[in-house]
Amino acid sequence: MSRIIAVHLLNDRSGSPLVLRQSLAVLAEAGYAIDLLTATPGEPGFLSDLPGVTLHPLAYRWSASQWHTLLNFALVQWVVFWKVLRLAQPGSLVYVNSLLPAGAALAARCRGARVVYHLHEVSLRPAPLRRLLCAVAQRTAHRLLCVSEHVRTTLALPVAGQKVVHNSLSPGFIEQANRASLPYDSPRPFVVLMACSLRDYKGVPEFFARPRAAPA
């Protein structure tokens, strides 16, 4: 049985841990042995209570102080490095979710394991940290999975194995949506809900531009 070591720093209710949960659920059903390193400083997140996954908790949290956050970030990289170094073997695959868990990629390379990055965003701050994390990714990754062509071309990491894998709804969500009844029966204007934070990089301008370009 192949072993996968997945690493995501902060387990919350945001998009990237949800995508990772969907990926790990499919991999667990396929029979892979999965170890997950993540931190849950508050309420349970999308990565909590995953069946078929062995959890290795991390002590990590964001802070209102940028310097405190950077210190926590540096410390958790050290912890992640040694945990992955202990868990990984030459036949293992280390699944690094986002650019942030760089220590996992470095440890995987030390152990001769394969490294797959799943990249979700491009707006990391401060800029020197982003450049450092990108440098680690381009030197350690065997394969990059990008959630959009925009992410792939904006990061422009010189890694040979790259693939765009768009985020999708889980089969369970689609099944539940198909069972839902509409709140009205008579024809009305078509309503679309875009559930996201109001940031340009989330595609909000494009969301409003699309209906304006559609024929009346």
Image (spheres, helix red, strand yellow):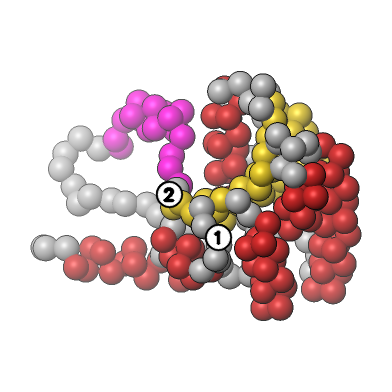
Residue named by callout 1 = 159
The residue under label 1 is which amino acid type? Answer: Val
- Quadrant into which the N terminus falls: top right
Q: Would you say residue 171 sits in the magenta stretch?
A: yes
Quarter-wise, where is residue 179 in the image?
top left
Identify the residue at image location x=20%, y=51%: 189
Left or right of 180: which side holds 158?
right
Q: Pick whichever, 143 or 205, lies toward us.
A: 143
Q: Position of residue 47 (x, y in %)?
A: 67, 38
Rendered view: 144 above or below 46:
below
The residue under label 2 is which amino acid type? Answer: His
Q: Is residue 120 visible?
A: no
Please tell me how crowded label 2 is: few (under 14), some (14-19), or many (20+) other residues with Cα within 10 Å: few
Q: Position of residue 164 (x, y in %)?
A: 44, 52
Identify the residue at image location x=58%, y=29%: 27
Task: Give the distance between the C-alpha atoms of the residues marked 1 and 2, in whole angstroms.
Answer: 19 Å
State which region is magenta.
Answer: 167-183
What is the number of the mark on residue 166? 2
